[in-house]
Image: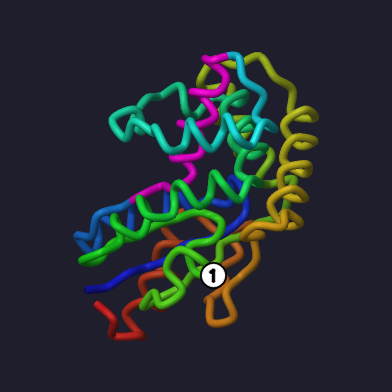
Amino acid sequence: MSIIAIDGTFASGKGTLGKRLSAHYGLPYLDTGKLYRAVGYAMLNAGKDPHDSAAAALAAQNLDASKLSDPVLKSGDVAVAASKLAVHKEVRSALLSFQRDFAKGGAILDGRDIGTVICPDADVKLYIDAKADVRAQRRFEELKGYGEDISYETVLAQLLERDTRDKTRKEAPLKPAADAHLIDTTALSIEEVVARAVKIIDATKAL
């Protein structure tokens, strides 16, 4: 059993890395952010406020895993809602078992608290980051590709707000695990990021 934990900031490239490593090592992959986005989408559909911890917890408890592949989860509004409800202890507790069960038998998970909370005993821990302006440009291009009408300035402002919320929340704040390997993707291509990650993982002889 081998578990690779990938944590990092929004739009830093950890999702793309997770998929590439999954294909490289033949391990199942989970983008844990989609769990929170699915809850956020359910909240928006029900007309609920993401700040309502009780309603968010109930939505998390009734999460429909079959919805995780829905493209709508990539939308800007859903991402914002997910970030807001992710601060609730009740929501994080409701999704904890799902993530740990997925990791059993070996897996690659990416998120905000994989190496620190979900899988603290992971064989390899990676922390992915990049400069805010670069991440905002990546997200801006992604949203334009989905046909969303949004400015780069708005994307950057939302990203900075999200960074602050992720890093300062009381429950499972975003931070590198003490034994995480840091990879700054600011000036790297995805191929270079994958190559660095593979080198780190192979050096641990965990796989």
- Image quarter hosting the C terminus: bottom left
Q: Is residue 103 magenta?
A: no
Q: Which residue is denoted by mark 1 in the rendering?
A: 116
Q: For the residue labelled by badge 1, is the local secondary structure a helix, a strand or a loop?
A: helix
Prevailing secondary structure of the magenta residues:
helix
Q: Residue at x 44, y 48 (%)?
A: 95
**Drawn side of residue 203 relative to residue 94, left or right:** left
Seen in the picture, residue 200 relative to 66 is either above or below; the reply is below
Magenta region, residue range: 30-46
Seen in the picture, residue 151 relative to 162 is either above or below; the reply is above
Q: How many marks?
A: 1
Q: Is residue 41 magenta?
A: yes
Please name the amino acid that badge 1 sits on.
Answer: Thr
Name the quadrant containing residue 168: bottom right
Q: Residue at x 36, y 33 (%)?
A: 68
- Image quarter hosting the N terminus: bottom left
Seen in the picture, residue 2 relative to 154 is either above or below; the reply is below
Q: Residue at x 49, y 29 (%)?
A: 74
Q: Nearer the viewer, residue 159 or 45?
A: 45
Residue 129 at x, y percent in the picture: 62, 59
Q: Nearer the viewer, residue 15 or 141?
A: 15
Residue 141 at x, y percent in the picture: 59, 30
